[in-house]
Image (cartoon, rainbow, N blue to C red):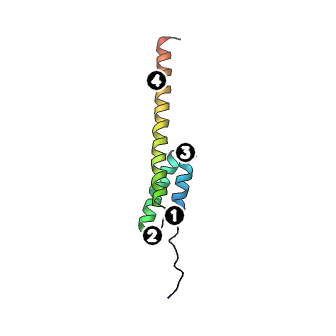
């Protein structure tokens, strides 16, 4: 019997998803997070929590960007209509 048992590898895409979400990217961590979760489910690798955190941060960042864009559009439209 071997005393050394190998730990499952950590999925690289889950790490990249987490890092890119911390960097403030929105679409990249969402795509990579979904791909890594599918790979983790299929291969049994570790990294599920990192992938989920990357997904959550990616979706929150995307929501933030959409809110900022919506506010900017509303400001520009209201200034254009008021003639300022």
Q: Are marks 4 and 2 in contact (CB under 8 Å)?
A: no
Pinpoint residue 32: horizontal percent, then vertical percent. 50, 55
- Neighbourhood count class around disc 1 (C-alpha, 10 Å): few under 14, some 14–19, many 20 upward: many
Identify the element where label 1 is drawn.
loop
Taking depth in this image into account, of 54 and 34 the one nearest to the observer is 54
Residue on which disc 4 sits: 74
In this picture, is 44 found above or below 61? below
User: Quick one: label 4 or label 2, which is nearer the N terminus?
Assistant: 2
Distance between the alpha carbons at the discs numbered 4 and 3? 24 Å
User: Quick one: label 1 or label 4, which is nearer the N terminus?
Assistant: 1
- Which label sits in the foreground, 4 or 2? 2
Residue 25 — which label?
3
In this picture, is 84 found above or below 64? above
Residue on which disc 1 sits: 11
Pinpoint residue 47: horizontal percent, then vertical percent. 49, 61
Identify the element where label 2 is drawn.
helix
Residue on which disc 2 sits: 43
Q: Are marks 2 and 1 in contact (CB under 8 Å)?
A: yes
């Amino acid at each position: 019997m071997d005393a050394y048992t190998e730990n499952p590898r950590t999925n690289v895409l889950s790490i990249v998803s987490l890092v890119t979400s911390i960097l403030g990217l929105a679409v990249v961590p969402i795509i990579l997070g979904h791909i890594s979760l599918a790979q983790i489910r299929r291969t049994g690798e570790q990294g599920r929590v990192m992938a989920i955190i990357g997904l959550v941060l990616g979706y929150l960042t995307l929501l933030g960007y959409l809110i900022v864009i919506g506010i900017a559009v509303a400001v520009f439209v209201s200034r254009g209509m008021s003639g300022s």
